[in-house]
Image (cartoon, rainbow, N blue to C red):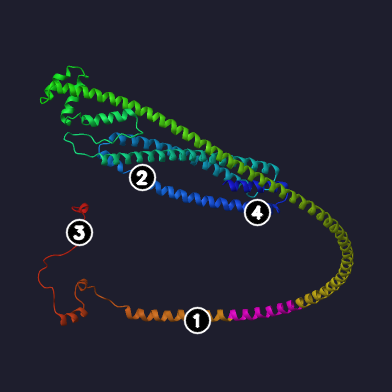
Amino acid sequence: MAALATTLCTAKQCSGQGDSSVQQPCTSSLDSVDHRLARQKAVQFLRQAEKNKRQIEKLEKERTLSTQCRKSGWTDVCGELEEYEKVLEDERNADKLNLRKQLVKIHNGVRKFQTQLTDVKPTPELIERLKEIMSEVEISISTLKEEQRSCLEELLKEDRTCRQEITAYEKKIENWSLAAKSDHKPTTAPTVKTKLPDRDLPAEVRALEVFLQKTGGLNGGWDQFDHQAFLKAWTRHSGQPAYRKEAKLYLPAKTLEEIEEHEDWHRELISLQDRKREAVQRWKASKQQERQTRIQSQKEMEEAERREKEAKSQAHQNRAEEEKREAARRLEEWREDKRRNEEREKEQRLCEEIQRRRREKEERRRQLEVKLTIEEQLRLRREQEEEEGRRKREEEQREIEERRKEAMQAIKHFKERDLHKVEAKLQEKQLREKEEEERQRRIAAKFKEKVDSQVSRDPSRLTRPTKGWDERMKHIGPSGGGPVLQMFHRAVPTWRQGL
């Protein structure tokens, strides 16, 4: 993103100087190198991010060991780990949200810059607005890079500190295991496995370990049940002498002298544990001071490295500015040469323009003469054509008049002929109608003679079978004889029954 912003800024400066055709020659090598370096850094960053993501997934899987810690009884440790993990998760979410907001701001600035560049004309106001947008984007990118750099430096410091502490604890645990293996001997009384005093440990810690080894461990030579009963009575009476009666009831196998001796042992143990706790606190404070000193020295070294990097960056920036100035000087020389060439070309074009105008003027004069000659010829030709057209129209008019007269005579002849034919057809039609009427009268008279007779009425013939039916029944015979058992008829609606 920074390389893109630098490239756009350089292009903007070149365009503000007046010629975009030299922009690519003056910045092509620098842009290509920056682009290649930016791509390499981006690829390397993505690879490292993928590697870190796989490492985080692996560590997340290893967190399942917390369930085993709970089963082993380390509930306090698990609670602290869960609280610390919750705090870290909240911090990570806050960092993600802040980073996303900054990236969205940078993205909006770049989109705004791209929108201003599309389909616009280069004006001083536009260039100033683009400068403001570019400066805002560069400030946002620089702020984001600085914040991420400081955050990564803090994380690296914490990582180095944690690695050193883990290495120290591993060495300490190895010493414990070696001491436990060398001094592992069976004893009759129940004792606690302790490590040998280390030369690096405080005297109070060594004194407590020696005391426990000599007196039989954390129970003072007693078994765990008796010691717990003693502690119960001791705690209830806050160490007052009245506890001895209750302890004697809980411990019938112990005498009062043994209980008093165990009391003295317990008081000595408490005193040694308090001194050990104070010594451990002092030891932690000294270690913290050493760690702060070491961190301060590392900060100084890193500050020196940072100053050296800044000096290198400043030298590189100065060299780039010198190259830009050299490119600007060459550009100015090229512009001066171009201006002189343009002036010579302008004078040459002016001479050519004068000659061209003279030729055009002569050509227009010649064309005007030709045009007048052609127009005169066209006028004479149009007059001849109009005369010929007038004569043709008169001849056509006479022919049309003659044809009209002939047509009128023919129409009159045809009308007379058609009139004779129509009268003949009417007479023929009337004659046929008279003959038809005569024939109809004759036919009606004949029918009247045949039909005019007296016929008697016989109502019973409607129910008698016809002769055709009688002939048919001769061959088939009667069917359906006997009484009618049921006769089907249409049903009567309920609303009409009884009417």
Q: Residue at x 58, y 53 (%)?
A: 36
Q: Is residue 398 above or below residue 216?
A: below
CA neighbours of label 1 inside 10 A, class few (<14), some (14 to 19), many (20+): few
Q: Is residue 210 above or below residue 495?
A: above
Q: CA distance from mark 3 to mark 4?
A: 109 Å
Q: Earlier in the sequence, mark 2 or mark 1?
A: 2
Tell me the quarter of the picture where residue 343 sits: bottom right
Image coordinates for residue 344, horizontal then vertical, percent: 84, 56
Q: Secondary structure at mark 4?
A: helix
Left or right: residue 455 versus residue 412 is left
In the image, what residue type sits under mark 2?
A: Glu
Task: Identify residue for label 3.
Answer: 491
Q: CA distance from mark 2 to mark 3?
A: 92 Å
Left or right: residue 323 versus residue 365 is left
Q: Earlier in the sequence, mark 4 or mark 2?
A: 4
Residue 432 tag number: 1
Q: Secondary structure at mark 2?
A: helix
Residue 60 tag number: 2
Q: CA distance from mark 3 to mark 1?
A: 62 Å
Q: Earlier in the sequence, mark 3 or mark 1?
A: 1
- Closer to viewer: mark 2 or mark 1: 2
In the image, what residue type sits under mark 3?
A: Ala
CA neighbours of label 4 inside 10 A, class few (<14), some (14 to 19), many (20+): few
Left or right: residue 160 versus residue 126 is left
Task: Identify residue for label 4.
Answer: 28
Q: In the rendered structure, does residue 360 fall within the stretch colored magenta?
A: no
Tell me where the magenta segment starts and ends, as one range: 402-423
Q: Earlier in the sequence, mark 3 or mark 4?
A: 4
Name the dominant secondary structure of the magenta segment: helix
Image coordinates for residue 25, horizontal then vertical, percent: 69, 54
Q: Residue at x 86, y 70 (%)?
A: 374
